[in-house]
Image: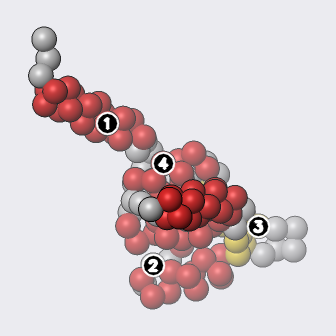
Amino acid sequence: MMLPAQRNTDNIQNLSNKRELVTRGPDPGQKIICLIGWLKKRGGVRKVSQCNEKLKQEGINIEDEIERIGTDFIRIYRTSGGEKVVRLENMPWADQWLLHYGMEVPHHSQFEKTKSKFLETERKI
C-alpha cells in the first residue's frame, strides 16, 4: 500500500518528466523569449527592423540569434518588395518555450473566460 506522501512524490516526478518532454529543440534563452512571444501574438511574422528595435535594449541582433537557434524554428525571408521579415517557422516549439519561461499570453477569448470565472468566484465569496 502506498502512503499519500509517496503518491504526491510520484506525481511531482511525473510532472517533471512531462516538463522535460515539453522543452524540445534549442532553448531560445530568457532574453529572446519575449520577442518570440511578441512575434507569435502578431501572427508569427514581423519586419527585421521591428524585431531589432524590440531587442535594442538587450543589445541583441535578431540575425545572430536566428543563426544560433536555427532556421528550422525561426527564419528570415525577403518579401516580394525586397524587405526582410522574421517568421516563426515552428509554432509548437515557440509555445513550449513560452510555457517553459512563463511567458505564454492567452488568446483574447481565453483571457475573457478566465476573467469571467474569476469574477464569478469573487461574487460567491
Count of marks overlaid on the render:
4
Residue with the mark numbered 1: 15
Labels 4 & 3 near each other (Cβ < 8 A): no
In the displayed structure image, the side of residue 62 where residue 13 appears, left or right: left
State the separation of the CA atoms marked 1 and 3.
42 Å
Q: Nearer the viewer, mark 2 or mark 4?
A: 4
* Amino acid type assigned to the residue bearing label 3 in the image: Arg
Residues packed near mark 3 inside 10 Å, few (<14), some (14 to 19) or many (20 plus): few
Q: Residue at x 76, y 67 (%)?
A: 78
Provide residue 82's location: percent of width, then percent of height.
Answer: 82, 74
Q: Earlier in the sequence, mark 3 or mark 2?
A: 2
Q: Earlier in the sequence, mark 2 or mark 4?
A: 2
Residue with the mark numbered 4: 96
- Considering the numbered disc 2 on the image, is that residue within a helix, a strand or a loop? loop
Residue 20, compared with residue 7, is above or below; it is below
Q: Residue at x 54, y 70 (%)?
A: 35
* Amino acid type assigned to the residue bearing label 1 in the image: Leu
- Considering the numbered disc 1 on the image, is that residue within a helix, a strand or a loop? helix
Residue with the mark numbered 3: 78
State the separation of the CA atoms marked 2 and 4.
22 Å
Provide residue 9's location: percent of width, then percent of height.
Answer: 17, 32
Q: Which mark is residue 60?
A: 2
Labels 2 & 4 near each other (Cβ < 8 A): no
* Amino acid type assigned to the residue bearing label 4 in the image: Gln
Residue 21, compared with residue 88, is above or below; it is above
Provide residue 49's location: percent of width, then percent of height.
Answer: 65, 82
